[in-house]
Image (cartoon, helix red, strand yellow):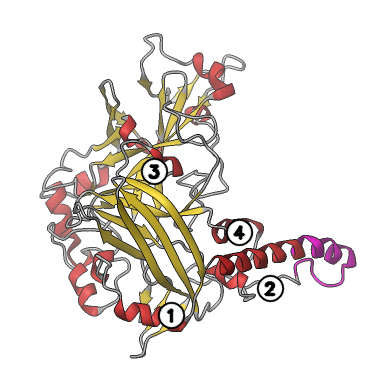
Amino acid sequence: MFSAMRKLSASLAGKIRLQVILLPICLIAGSPPAFAWIKSVPANEYGESGDAKGTYFHLYAKYSVGGSERLVFDLQISCGTHTFEDGRLVHGYLPALYAKETASGAAVMLATPRVCDAIRFAEDRPVADDEEFRQSWKQVVEGNFIPFTIWFEDASNLTHGFGYAAESAFDNPASPLTFVDAWVEPSSERAFSRWYKTEKDNLLKEFQIGPRFVTGEDDKAYWATFDPEKKLLPLSCTGVAITPFGEDQREVEQYYPTARPRYWLAPEILPDTRNGEGRSKLDLVPKLGTEYYASSPSQEFPIGYNYLRLSERDSKSDSLSSDELPDYYPAYRSDDYPFAGKGTLREERLTVSVDLRPERKGLLSCASPFNPLGYGMANFGQMYEHYFGPGYGERLVNFGKVIDLEIIDERERIELEGIPQPLALPHFLIEDKAAAEFVTFDFFGGGHVE
């Protein structure tokens, strides 16, 4: 295995060096296009390059549960297009999600890292190529990644879990899960087919991945009608990213209320004493970077890859925020399943509860919205009436225009009620020290079988 990894890393390194050397030559020569030498094809509708036929890899991830139980994911993954013996085709990743039960009755679910282009690149096959991709591929093949991991307290109820948003979350003393190791290496159709026929450890059945990804006719029929008892598997996780103001702290101090609250909201329009014009409260949010996922500005969770990058940050810090990377804490929404219940959305207000207690540091709340894409479309009126009550039309339209924000920390519970226009309020402030911005980590969960 290690020799294969060294070969894979060397192959990537060689490609990167070759591109650095050739680029000036192409620019100077001027006859062919500057990037004509790059073997590149556009991504297809599944987010992979070209037809991407016949690509397979071996994924290994090891964890420790409760400091004593060894939990290993030893998986064969198909990506691109795979043809089964009965003629069925699967496009994308299979399995895309994999869950295993622990000895205590909890469950751990992995979202398969979307690294097929890295495998094809190492095998000298066409890929959609740019510098950001190459850096991510290099990290993956060197083993510097953690598959996006979700912990469920009860293996029999996978409707709500906690996603590990940062490497340091595994080192939290309250974490039941410790990350040990992970790696990938190229595999083959034969190895995948042999493994897929015999593997029986995945807790998930295809219908559980929800209405957006199921492909079988029976599974489609199952999700075509609304039933509040159907259990929705989460495909995204929400929380807040806390970032210190740093050098901008002095600017924030002039707007900090005289009552010196621990948590507060910036005024809708901030006075600018220099020219008398108002400023957006967004100016108080530290710039977290836009080169990664727009709704999840994380340097550790790049867009669409389903894994965390390993970092050099100090995981032993007990502070609420650090100077290098944001700290993450879970945020629960009242319109998430299973928190929403019959009639609970009648009041039109969205309630968001943020948990800043130390034992939740590094985690996100993972749940499905009560109305995920494709669910109950045949009788959506029944679904909305269940949550919003009879004559739901106006309440549905107005829902979320006002929010109630609850913040829980190790000392107290704070309620900020009746906040208007939540879309213009993507954050709250912590004293004059930091901003907490609401973020969502979407992960991808399904192959498409024909």
Per the image, the residue denoted by label 2 is 39
Cβ–Cβ below 8 Å for labels 3 and 2? no
| CA distance separating discs 1 and 2 | 27 Å
Report the amino acid beneath label 3. Answer: Phe
Report the amino acid beneath label 2. Answer: Lys
Camera-side mark, 3 or 4: 3
Q: Which mark is residue 41?
A: none
| CA distance separating discs 4 and 2 | 17 Å
Camera-side mark, 4 or 2: 4
Report the amino acid beneath label 1. Answer: Ala
Per the image, the residue denoted by label 4 is 138
Per the image, the residue denoted by label 3 is 170
Q: How many tags in the picture?
A: 4
Earlier sequence position, callout 4 versus callout 1 = 4
Please indicate whether residue 23 sits to the left or right of residue 383 in the image: right
Query: Which range of residues does the magenta coloring cover?
Result: 19-35
Earlier sequence position, callout 3 versus callout 4 = 4
